[in-house]
Amino acid sequence: MANILKDDQKHAEQLRKIDAGKIDTGTTGQAMKRRPREFVSAVGADRITDGSPVDFYFYTTQTLSQRQADAGWKLMGLYRQGFPQPRLVGRIGEVGRELVSGEEEEMLASARRLFTELTDKLPVVAGRMISRIVRNEYPDCRMGVTHLMEGLDIVADRLKLPR
């Protein structure tokens, strides 16, 4: 019986932290359970409606500032532009290969170059957290969001975003 009371106390403490806005959670925790969801009848299950980790930390937990979120969205866009999924084209009698025009390759190289300039020489843990969010993964549970905020502040300074 004492264990049940302890669990209830822990749960109440976590809810209090969420309500106070002092939560630092990544892939687990009560904040993840509070993410906005929408029931999709075709699938028969709920689908999470905040699309990316930056959306989650900006809209749902309100952990990131507008400036940090803008820097995160910019990095995510550059990552998608510069590092797209390989497109394989197969033809009869040929081996599948990626077909990219010269102008498209220049656009990809430009996005990769800008992404590298913005993320170059970040603190190690902050860089890791940023590399996770651009791949649409969540930061580590243990202080991951704090390091993410630090890295996004540095990137926002490099982008010269207004404070």
Image (cartoon, rainbow, N blue to C red):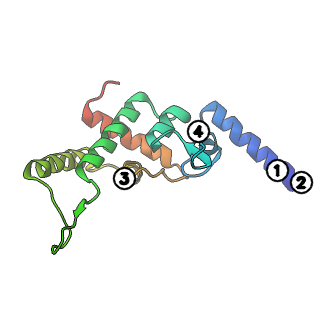
The image position of residue 43, as x and y in percent, is 58, 50
Alpha carbon distance from label 3 to label 4? 28 Å
Q: Nearer the viewer, mark 3 or mark 4?
A: 4
Would you say the residues marked 1 and 2 are in contact, meaning their CB atoms lie under 8 Å apart?
yes
User: What amino acid is at disc 4?
Assistant: Glu
- Under tag 3, what secondary structure? helix
Q: Which residue is mark 4?
A: 38
Instruction: Give the mark, 4 or 2, whose residue is nearer the N terminus.
Output: 2
Determine the residue positioned at 48% across, 34% down: 58
Reading the image, the residue beneath label 2 is: 2
- Tell me if residue 98 comes above or below residue 130 in the rendering: below
Name the secondary structure under disc 2: helix
Going from N to C along the chain, the mark reached first, 3 or 1, is: 1
What amino acid is at disc 1? Lys
Residue occupied by mark 3: 131
Which is more foreground, mark 1 or mark 4?
Answer: 4
Foreground: 5 or 73?
73
Q: CA distance from mark 3 to mark 2?
A: 42 Å
Left or right side of 40 for 79: left
| Quadrant assignment for the N terminus | bottom right
Of the residues shown, which amino acid type is indicated by label 2? Ala
Q: Earlier in the sequence, mark 3 or mark 4?
A: 4
Res. 62 visible in picture: no
Q: Which residue is mark 1?
A: 6
- Disc 1 + disc 4, Cβ < 8 Å: no
Residue 151 in percent (x, y) is at 37, 43
Q: Is residue 51 above or below residue 86?
A: above
Q: Position of residue 15 (x, y in %)?
A: 70, 38
- Under circle 4, the secondary element is strand
